[in-house]
Every structure is written in structure tokens, then in C-alpha cells.
Image (cartoon, rainbow, N blue to C red):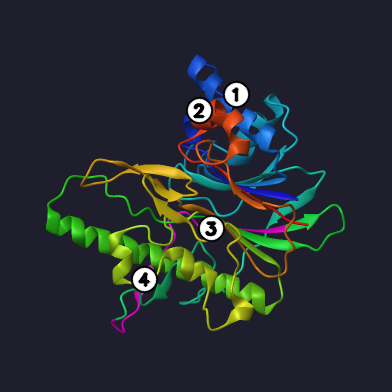
């Protein structure tokens, strides 16, 4: 089975309010590029971030209707979609999958009303700055918890698809406020990932095979502010090195920093100080030790500048999104 994590840049922009696909030349080019990527890489289960919107107050926007309409229009075998708790904005987290290979359903955990480990749609408390006082946080985009039942009789497994807090600063400010905002954003990111880690620990205690994937907006050694905290958000999700049984594995391995940034990389960003474009690895797939991986390269980032197998898809990958997908092949 091939799993994919894919941030499809502002996918919501390409659908009408009735969930139909827009028909402009630009929209058709976008839809063709995304369909080409999914057809060529051929995943069975896709964790999507920046998916089409589901409205919760006014309007009739539906992530599921938009994604299933797109799949039908492009004759994709990944024809079924599902979501969990809707986000507070226009970017949703969803799963698109092949119903002949698996059935995927929302399976929310946590205890309602809990201060430390509630459902992802509720507020939670955590001491994010190590001052002995717990702060109150809430996921802006509640991570999607899903149970995957395999059609081939293989063991059921559970997955979390997340789109964590961005550390990006998109408004003008002086150097002092930039520093304060950067630290505050990282604390928010760490709080969200600590909440995800608590759910991972719940699942592992119940011996649930566990996958965590998505746009975590961070990676080992990603920026200066990480050094103040001693670890990245990804390492929070992976777990405690002193408790090997509960550690998640990172099948891609440690990325390397080179002339153009990180390799492998799933996205590129502009350095705030130098103006240089820097490669970043912020989309991830992590797995518990229940899984057997298949093939000589079971984990891949489909970056056409770094992966030979992705080079024939360069035009489609660049046209589909500003992120490159990550895949993991499991037995």
C-alpha cells in the first residue's frame, strides 16, 4: 500500500461555491497537473492539506463533494474522500482514497472536556515556555484522525493528518517584534505538536499501528529559533529517545543541508534576511514500529530537482502545488 502526504496549494481556490470545479483555462491547467501527479505516483491513500473548504456557518461548501467531484472528473481511482473536524478557515485537512483498497473513517480520540488531552476540536492546556504555568491553546485546523481498514485483510491502522501552525511572519514589523513573534509562533507550533504526540501515545498504549503525516511546517534544524528550544516540532511528534518502544520512525532519514538548503525538500521559502530561496523539508510521514516497509526506497519526496523518478513529472509537480508530495510504501 502506498501512502501519500500532499499539500495541494490553496486547492479551495479552484472550486465554485456549489463545489463544482471552475472551468477557466487556468483552473483546467491546475486540475490536470494535480490529476497527472496522483495518477503517476499512484497512491492508495492520500492525506491532503490545504484541501477545499467546508463551511460551518453560511454557505454549502463541502470538502468531500469537491474532492469526489474532482476525482470523478479526472477518472481517479482514489474516488472517495473524508474529513474530520472542519477548520476555522478555508484550508481543510482531508483523506482521498481508493475504496477498492481501503475504507477510511473518522475516529476521533481524546476525552471531552479534558484540559490535557481533549478531542482536537477543543481547547487544551500545555506549558509551552517551561515557566511552570500552562497556557491555553486550540488547533486552528484540527488534525484529522482516521481509521484505515484494508481490503486485502492486512491489519487495520490509524493515521493522523496534520497541518500545523505556520512559523511564517507575513506582516511588516520591527526587529524586536519579529523576534517576539517568531518565538510565539514556535511555541504555538510546539503546543499543537505536543497535543498530536499525546494522541500518538494513547494509540500506542492500545497497540494501534500509527501513521502521522502532513504539513508540520517544521523540520530538524529548520531555523534559528529552534535552537532556543533544543528540538524541532517533528522531534516532538517522534517521541522520547529514552522510550524506544513509543518512538515513531522517520523513514526518509535525516535530511542534509547543502548549497540550496535541505535535501530532500518539499517546499522552498525566501530567507527574510538574505532574500535567497531556501529548500525546506516541512511535509513528513512518520510511522510506528508495527509497519514493514517495501521496496528499495520505501519513503520518497517527489521533488523533480532531487529525485530521478520525479523528473518526468516536473511540469505537473510545479503546476500542481508549491509543495512536493511525500510517499511511504508499506507491506
Place of residue 146 in the rendered image (x, y in percent of width and height, measured from the top left):
66, 58
Q: Which residue is mark 3?
A: 143
The CA distance from mark 1 to mark 3 is: 28 Å
Quarter holding the C terminus is bottom right
Vertical relation: 60 (above or below) 273? above
The CA distance from mark 1 to mark 2 is: 9 Å
Q: Which residue is mark 2?
A: 319
For label 4, the SS is: strand
Place of residue 157 in the rendered image (x, y in percent of width and height, measured from the top left):
73, 62
User: Which disc is residue 313 wearing?
Assistant: none
Please name whichever residue, 81 or 18, is drawn nearer the observer in this view of the structure. 81
Vertical relation: 293 (above or below) 197? above
The CA distance from mark 1 to mark 4 is: 43 Å
Q: Is residue 139 magenta?
A: yes
Residue 152 located left or right of residue 179: right
How dense is the environment of label 2, judged by Cα within 10 Å: few (below 14), some, or many (20 and up)?
some
The CA distance from mark 3 to mark 2 is: 27 Å
In magenta, the rendered stretch is 131-147
Residue contact at pointers 1 and 2, CB within 8 angstroms:
yes
Residue sitting at the far front: 259
Residue contact at pointers 1 and 4, CB within 8 angstroms:
no
Q: Earlier in the sequence, mark 1 or mark 3?
A: 1
Residue 305 located left or right of residue 76: left
Q: Which residue is mark 1?
A: 32
Residue at x-position 55% and y-position 60%: 253
Q: Earlier in the sequence, mark 1 or mark 4?
A: 1
Q: Earlier in the sequence, mark 4 or mark 3?
A: 4
The CA distance from mark 4 to mark 3 is: 17 Å
Residue at x-position 72% and y-position 69%: 290
Q: Quadrant of residue 185?
A: bottom left
Q: Which residue is mark 4?
A: 136
Amino acid at each position: 500500500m502506498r501512502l501519500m502526504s500532499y499539500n495541494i496549494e490553496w486547492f479551495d481556490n479552484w472550486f465554485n461555491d456549489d463545489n463544482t470545479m471552475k472551468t477557466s483555462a487556468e483552473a483546467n491547467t491546475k486540475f490536470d497537473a494535480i490529476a497527472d501527479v496522483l495518477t503517476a505516483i499512484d497512491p492508495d491513500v492520500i492525506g491532503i492539506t490545504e484541501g477545499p473548504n467546508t463551511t460551518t456557518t453560511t454557505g454549502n461548501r463541502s470538502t468531500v463533494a469537491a474532492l469526489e467531484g474532482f476525482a470523478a472528473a479526472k477518472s481517479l481511482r482514489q474516488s472517495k474522500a473524508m474529513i474530520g473536524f472542519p477548520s476555522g478557515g478555508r484550508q481543510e485537512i482531508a483523506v482521498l482514497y481508493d475504496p477498492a483498497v481501503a475504507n477510511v473513517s473518522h475516529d476521533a480520540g481524546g476525552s471531552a472536556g479534558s484540559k490535557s488531552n481533549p478531542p482536537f476540536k477543543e481547547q487544551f492546556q500545555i506549558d509551552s515556555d517551561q515557566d511552570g504555568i500552562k497556557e491555553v491553546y486550540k488547533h486552528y485546523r484540527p488534525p484529522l484522525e482516521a481509521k484505515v481498514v484494508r481490503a486485502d485483510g492486512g491489519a487495520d491502522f490509524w493515521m493522523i493528518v496534520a497541518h500545523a501552525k505556520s512559523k511564517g511572519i507575513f506582516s511588516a514589523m520591527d526587529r524586536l517584534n519579529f523576534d517576539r513573534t517568531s518565538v510565539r509562533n514556535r511555541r504555538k507550533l510546539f503546543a499543537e505538536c505536543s497535543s498530536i504526540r499525546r494522541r500518538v501515545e494513547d494509540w500506542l498504549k492500545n497497540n494501534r499501528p500509527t501513521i502521522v503525516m502532513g504539513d508540520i511546517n517544521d523540520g530538524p534544524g529548520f531555523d534559528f529559533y529552534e535552537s532556543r528550544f533544543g528540538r524541532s516540532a517533528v522531534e516532538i511528534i517522534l517521541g522520547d529517545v529514552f522510550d524506544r518502544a513509543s518512538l515513531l520512525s522517520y523513514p526518509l532519514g535525516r535530511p542534509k543541508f547543502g548549497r540550496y538548503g535541505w535535501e530532500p525538500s518539499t517546499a522552498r521559502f525566501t530567507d527574510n534576511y538574505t532574500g535567497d530561496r531556501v529548500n525546506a523539508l516541512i511535509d513528513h510521514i512518520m510511522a510506528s514500529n508495527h509497519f514493514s516497509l517495501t521496496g528499495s526506497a520505501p519513503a520518497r519526496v517527489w521533488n523533480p530537482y532531487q529525485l530521478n523518478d520525479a523528473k518526468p513529472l516536473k511540469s505537473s509537480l510545479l503546476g500542481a502545488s508549491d509543495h512536493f508530495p511525500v510517499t511511504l510504501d508499506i507491506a
